[in-house]
Image (cartoon, rainbow, N blue to C red):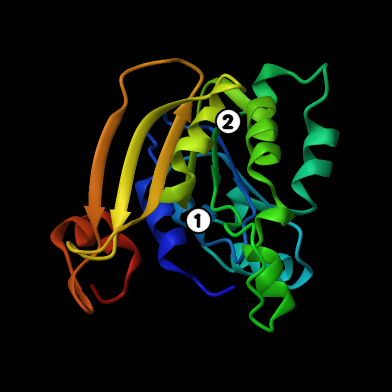
Amino acid sequence: MKIGTDGVLLGAWTSLDNNPYSILDIGAGTGIIALMLAQRSAADTIEGIELDDAAFEQCTENFETSIWADRLFCFHAGFDEFVDEYATDDIDTDELYDLIVSNPPFYAEAVPSGNEARDNARQNSSLPFDELISGVSKLLAENGLFSTIIPFKEEENFIAMAATFQLFPKRITRVKGNATAEIKRSLLEFQQAIIPVETTELIIEEERHQYTKDYIDLTKDFYLKM
């Protein structure tokens, strides 16, 4: 899986206002989001979970060759088995994560591309939203934050599902490719308390390859040329 706009958006948009000590990236892929958060934060522990063999190997290599290697680690596991092993009844609250991020698989329908690894990474069936949210609710510290990016069409159902696990939206940013395009993505931040939601909109391009000031301001620290 090559680096895409969704991962860059999530890595740059995710709030670090709670000064997280520990961060978990679910479905780390090549490790881009975890690496961005390592660049942005002083978190002591930044861990990823990745099931796909090739992606796990790439993620581990990227972690080990980065300047933040001492703070980064990737588990080769499925999220369900990670939760089963980690989130036991006697888990110490100090072992829960202050920040959890995930750029989850999107598509529940069959959309074969001819690349099995890519299709598995994009299929909702490989990590259903209810399984993701349930696991997050068991791993998130009391004052922790959960950030994710999903298709806008899934936003309402995702928020309703999260509420059943006592996770409530704090920030929502809806993303459009350009000013006249339909909303494509929703960046969502959740916490374990109900507060007024901060809702904003982000437009990526003014025209093809001409980025808006908002997008540049958000992501410029991560591009060599912007």
Q: Amino acid at mark 2?
A: Met
Q: Label 1 belongs to which residue?
A: 33
Count of numbered tags: 2
Q: Is disc 2 placed on a helix, strand or loop?
A: helix
How far across and down, in percent of the image, does residue 136 sit? 64, 33
Q: Label 2 belongs to which residue?
A: 161
Could you tell me which quadrant the C terminus lies in? bottom left
Q: Amino acid at mark 1?
A: Ile
How far across and down, in percent of the image, does residue 99 sit? 52, 35
Residue 111: quadrant of the picture:
bottom right
Near-viewer residue (85 or 37):
85
- Residue 210 appears left or right of 221: left
Q: Which mark is residue 2?
A: none
Q: Is residue 163 above or below residue 126?
A: above
Compare marks 1 and 2 and give the one earlier in the sequence.
1
Within 10 Å of disc 1 (Cα), the crowding (few <14, some 14-19, many 20+) is many
Residue 196: quadrant of the picture:
top left
Q: Is residue 100 above or below residue 203?
A: above
Q: Is disc 1 placed on a helix, strand or loop?
A: helix
Residue found at x 24% / y 52%: 202
- Residue 82 appears left or right of 219: right
How far across and down, in percent of the image, does residue 207 sit? 17, 75
Residue found at x 82% / y 16%: 90
Residue found at x 43% / y 53%: 11
Residue 189: quadrant of the picture:
top left
